[in-house]
Amino acid sequence: MKKLSIKLGALFFLIIFGLETFMFSFLHSNIVESRIEEELLALQARGNSHRSILEKSLDSDTISHVTLMESEANTDVVVTDIKGQVLDSSVPIEYITQYIERSFSSIPRKGQVVEDNWKEESYISTVSLLEINGEPAGHVFMFQNTESIHSLIDRLNEHFLLAGLIAVFLTFIIIIFLSKALAKPLIKMKEATSKISKGDFSVSLPKIRKDELGDLAKSIQLLANDLSYLKQERNDFLASISHELRTPLTYIKGYTNIIHRRNLSIEEREKYVSIILEETNRLSDLVTDLFDLAKIDKNSFVIQKRLIDLSNFMLKIEQKFSPAYQEKNISLVVRCPDDLFIKADPLRLEQIIFNLLDNSIKYSSSGAKTILTVMRNSNQDVQITIKDNGKGIPKKDIPYIFNRFYRVEKSRTRTLGGSGMGLAIVKELVHAHGGTIKVKSEENKGTEFELTFKGEEKR
Ligand SMILES: Nc1ncnc2c1ncn2[C@@H]1O[C@H](COP(=O)(O)OP(=O)(O)OP(=O)(O)O)[C@@H](O)[C@H]1O
Ligand SMILES: [Mg+2]
């Protein structure tokens, strides 16, 4: 589980450790170099000042005075004549012969470095040229034992080691916190997704971050909420289906039992058989509706669009529906101009209009009026409105009437008896045609459904 933070931490550590090592060794070698350079410059300056004294009076007194002064200091001096003969020295001569025997072509006035290899040699050394009356008269060699330099560098190394250890330790601590802080939200999200995959959608991820990790957390949260909603919806849907199937089945079973057991008159038998037939039809309609909706959900629903002449189409609808309206003493008015066309599947369009007209019959009482109007609106779209002055829909129910199995009157009376699937199918079919559907309704005043489709010109 913590693998990610370990990997991240190790990677950070390696990178920062490498950088630190590089910077420390760069700094170290720079400090050492400039320290040695300083020592050599100081040695050279000291040699030059001895030379100045000796140039004023090059006698044995002055020479021994200079070497005496140097024997008290931690540097050493050797004075030679121009042929290389040692005139005096503050250090045993055998230690330094190898340096003064080297040949020097032209020594500049400020002096010259003889030996700067402090790592391997026992001395670092410089030389200054002695001139009397403009003529070379000898050399002043200065020496410094490299032991003191070694101990200086050792001290420097100790300081570097300590600083390095502290830096590594602090890096380590910081990286532990940093990699944990980085990996923590990822681990939380991983736990959340595995919870979701096990069907538990009650995840809650912190929403404080505003970076990509925050976006990811938001998406996972959204996914969990959507899945939870879908699961709830599926459960409700299954509950409604079983309920809707059970009611007609109970009727069928009950009346079949009655017919089976009792001696009934012909009329009674006729009556019960017709109820059974009605319920069987209802069941079969319900199954067809469910099948249609399932097909729409699966996108396996084929819509075969054709150019439809709406005035013709509506005339046929009027002829088909008039008897049903007459039977309930409701008047149906259809208004459709001649030159309106849309591209739609005629069977599906008929299903849409059928469901809406069916509702206007079911939810209006005798003497009411339904008007079906087709027209072109200001956007050149075709608008179909079906307006009735029936019982209307209560305001609180309007947002739900397109839901599957939603009915305003929850108890299913045998006279009204819908299953609440009609408008759900209408909505899906209208959307499948690229159209929109709107509803306006007022209780006890009436209802108006407004469909909008893209209009077509007749070729
Ligand atoms: N024209 C209308 N007037 C009043 N109420 C309506 C009208 N159309 C729909 N409703 C209300 O909306 C609900 C949902 O309508 P829908 O057509 O989806 O179902 P249904 O008519 O009850 O059943 P089905 O259409 O499946 O036979 C109805 O139960 C009814 O209460
Ligand atoms: Mg209906």
Image (tube, rainbow, N blue to C red):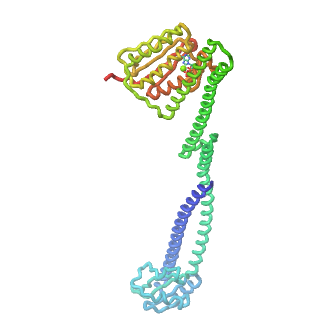
**Can you tell me which quadrant of the image ligand 1 is in?**
top right
Q: Nearer the viewer, residue 2 or 333?
A: 333
Left or right for 418, reference 135: right
In this view, 149 is above or below 268 = below
Q: Nearer the viewer, residue 245 or 201?
A: 245
Q: Give me the residue at 62% from left, 64% from top.
A: 166
Give the position of the C terminus as an image quadrant. top left
In this view, 126 is above or below 301 = below
The percent position of residue 310, horizontal first and vertical second, equals: 39, 18
Q: Give me the residue at 60% from left, 41% from top.
A: 207
Hey, which residue is sitting farthest front in the picture? 263
Q: How many marks?
A: 0
The percent position of residue 300, horizontal first and vertical second, equals: 47, 34
In this view, 214 is above or below 262 = below
Q: Nearer the viewer, residue 227 or 75?
A: 227
The percent position of residue 182, horizontal first and vertical second, equals: 58, 51
Quadrant in the picture for residue 334? top left
Give the position of the N terminus as an image quadrant. bottom right
Q: Nearer the viewer, residue 376 or 231?
A: 231
Q: Is residue 399 visible to us here?
A: no
The percent position of residue 402, horizontal first and vertical second, equals: 54, 24
Q: Give me the residue at 50% from left, 32% from top.
A: 295
Hey, which residue is sitting farthest right in the picture? 262
